[in-house]
Image: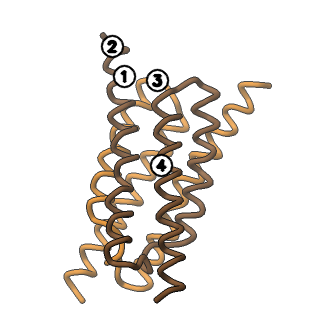
Chain colours: A brown, B orange
Amino acid sequence: MYSLNVEFFGYFAAILTTAAFLPQLIKTLKTKKADDVSLLTLIMFMSGVGSWIIYGYAISSSPILIANIITLLLNFFILISKIYYARKY
Amino acid sequence: MYSLNVEFFGYFAAILTTAAFLPQLIKTLKTKKADDVSLLTLIMFMSGVGSWIIYGYAISSSPILIANIITLLLNFFILISKIYYARKY
């Protein structure tokens, strides 16, 4: 029962910190700009998320592993959108 | 030696995904706006980070625990700055 609760918090955290980047991606695509979003934050965050993937794999934590792979993908799309719109407009 | 490498990736990931939010906070304070930063992303992300703190404590992972406490604080300051500048300007 205890480990079940732990897993719950892991997956709840994983879903939230992953899904959190969807509104940012949607907002960027809608407004066609992300000038206020820090480029350095995106680059550092994606590097860190990549390291969490290695760490999650090493300690065999599925929530950390799966969440960070999707988080990396979403932030990659935000980064590409930011650069694309900055060049276009 | 193996566990030492695992810890290294954990702390490297922790430092990067935590420090990543400093450039965003500095940028927001300098430009005095964060209109392009999604409010929903900040709220969902902070809720998720709060859950990671509980998870990190439960599985006794120091990198997860420490990193997420600082990440929560930095994002809290970004959220406050965003709301403050949106009202003021």
| Residue A29 x, y percent position in the rendering | 37, 71
Q: Are discs 1 and 3 less than 8 Å apart at CB?
A: yes
Q: Residue at x 45, y 31 (%)?
A: A63
Q: Residues within 10 Å of mark 2 (few under 14, many from 20)?
A: few
Residue A35 drawn above or below residue A21: below
Q: Are discs 2 and 1 less than 8 Å apart at CB?
A: yes
Front of the two marks 2 and 4: 4
Residue of label 3: B59
For mark 3, name the chain. Answer: B
Secondary structure category for the residue under label 1: helix
> In the rendered structure, which disc, 2 or 4, sits on the residue that comes first in sequence?
2
Residue of label 2: A2
Name the one closer to the observer, B15 or A54.
A54
Residue of label 1: A6
- Residue sticking out furthest to the front: A88
Q: Residue at x 35, y 48 (%)?
A: A19
3D distance between C-alphas at marks 2 and 1: 6 Å
3D distance between C-alphas at marks 3 and 2: 11 Å
> In the rendered structure, which disc, 1 or 4, sits on the residue that comes first in sequence?
1
